[in-house]
Amino acid sequence: MLVVLIAVLLALAIVGPAYSEPTGYLALLRRAAPLMILAIGQYFVIVSGGFDLSVGSLVTAVVVIAARLIDGQESLTFPVIILLLAFGAGVGLVNGIITTRLLVPSFIVTFGMLLILEGAVFLWTGGAPRGALSETFRAFGRKGFEDVPVIGQLPYSVLVLLAVTVAAVVAMRSGWGRTLVAVGDNETAVHLAGGRVWQLRTTAFVLSGLLAAVAGILAGGFGGVSAQVGQGYEFQAITAVVLGGVLLGGGRGSVVAAMFGALTLEALFALLTLLGVPRTLESLIQGVIIIAAVAYAANSAGWRDRFRRTDLGVAIADPSVAPVDAIASPTDVQRTAPARPSHPTERQFPADSKEQG
Amino acid sequence: MTTPPARRPVVGRVDFSNPTHSVYAALAAILVSGSILVALQGGVYLDSAGVLSILSDSTALGLVAIGQTIVILCRSLDLSVALLIGLCSLVAAEIMDGRTSMVVPAIVATLAVAALVGLANGLIITKLRVNAFIATLGMALILRGLLEARYTGPAGDTPLSFQQVGYTRIGPIPVSALIVLALAAATWWYLTQSRAGYHVYAVGGSPEIARLSGVRTDRTIISAHVLCSLAAGITGLYFAARLDSGSPFVGTDGAYDLQSIAAVVLGGTLLAGGRGGIVGTIGGVLILASLDTLFDDLGVNPFFKDVVRGVVIIVAVAIYARRAVDPRRRVERSPAEAGAAP
């Protein structure tokens, strides 16, 4: 299924003059890095059964706060970066705690957090972002190691992306990662087996927030300061995860798959821009992609068990069961056996069905 | 195996374990404490201007929330309402184009567009078997794309005759609020007294069992989504009347998608569907509108209002998620599972 990604990349090469050399692709990678990192964070949350809709406004908040605090002074760069990372993790922590302990469905919590962050940011800046980023800060998103053979410039953002990816893959292959996937699959089972469900899910949210802060730092460096920096990023990230999970993982998702989903999305948009399709249609295409991807997953043979007819799919918390915050509601009582045996190393796409009783 | 019924927290004649009672109790509490707070600042909360403000805010939100109630009751969700409102306001305003003669065709066209979107949502969810969250999210993105491609700001022109609908009042009560009340009553009748409405509850309670009992689940869900989108369409018409033109992002600016869901949940309808109703939803709408007016009265910074709105929604759902226990599920769980719940 990497075919689609490769096809898009090839099409880019044909259509755009910039893509006949590696530097063109590298520029694409640099531009896509924030989204890819966001997709990794979103993957952690989705695979454990939730959604994080606050990442877009978190990215905006990070950029705006950075500009205001740094205000051009180089010496403040690193302390502010540390602060921003802590801020991102903190927001994720709040999201996670409210979802898991207060049993509020994650999409409501994170949507509410989106409003809160937007409002708070505007409140603090009085409506328009002020201040400026330092050169050092911007370097993260913009610069890289120069004069590298073959590719010219190796952007720092790509290095950060690689580091995050490696860390994420290692994490997912660890016991923690596999239990996280299990949580998304069947929370009750994990709980009965002794896993600390709420801690796992909260950690997923913390990671999502942290990575959103990282993505914000890169995006701010690359794109500059504005109130629209992060707009729509959360939906792009979700689309990327869904796309990656379906196209690349054979119906299941892995961290790498989510990342490639993000890359495919960005490459697709680049291709469309080159073809002259207006940017404003991006949302429309995204919407179609996200529906098509999930429809494909829901209707292909191996998945009929997972996405059953009855799973109308509401992200809810059903408080009478052990804290469930799933993409679909717990369904009928008659299903007593798991739809298919879970091999511990299988990368599972966020499962919809929850066993009941 | 049933657990013995808990001691019901009844104070006087208000039964706090009944979400519908408690939402109106909460509303009363907010109105009372709001009046005190505003009086301390030297103003009057519930004067005719205040009541008018609350009712006006409630009108748009109430319309959307009515539709959202039906959809949530059958265990689905509609995240596309905010953008649909914008689209419908534009369709209406542009077709009317300032001419009274075009009012009726515009209304027909707007409702047709709304119904189509609802039909699409319903079909994607039932036939393509896409998750409601993703399906309506995708639809929202598609609508956003369409709007962003064609419009950068308000467009169209509503004739004065139609604007009347938005502004006429009988005493302190806007006519539009009465229209909403009438729609709410009609929906209440539909949900509680008609067979189709009963099916909505059935599908929400357990789609599989409903299907096995002969209920056409697909049809029920599709019609629920069509009704919800029609409600959003009517809301669009309302905004066209109030704003003198159509506005593409009037729905998203007011976060009507999240607010409508919050109003429904506040009103005691379970997000899992199957329980709840319109009466509670109206209470939830009134609460959110009262809080909005209260903050305006207290002179709260509008950006801060956004922050508080987000917090209120989360807190409200948190309170209700803990409390809204579904006895059906209790029965179906084994004692072992019941003991394992943290």
Image: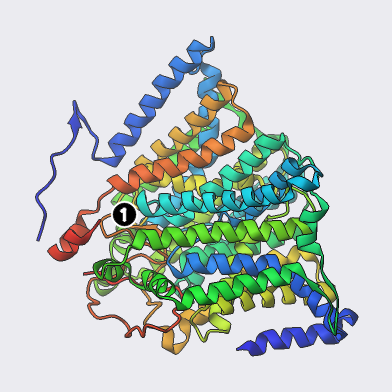
In the picture, the quarter occupied by the N terminus of chain B is bottom left
User: Left or right: where does residue A125 sit relative to residue B123?
Assistant: right
Q: Residue at x 75, y 44 (%)?
A: A70
In depth, the one of A108 and A223 nearer the eye is: A223
Q: Residues within 10 Å of mark 1 (few under 14, many from 20)?
A: few
In depth, the one of B258 and B161 nearer the eye is: B258
Q: Residue at x 72, y 60 (%)?
A: A218
Q: Which residue is drawn at 61% across and 58% down?
A: A212
In the picture, the quarter occupied by the C terminus of chain B is bottom left
**Which residue is label 1 attached to?**
B194
x and y percentages locating residue A250 in the rendered image:
52, 87
Of all chains, the one bearing label 1 is B
Q: Kindly tell me whether residue B237 is visible in this rendering.
A: yes
Element class at badge 1 = loop
x and y percentages locating residue B108 in the rendered image:
61, 54
Amino acid carrying mark 1 in the image: Ser
User: Left or right: where does residue B298 sit relative to residue B10?
Assistant: right
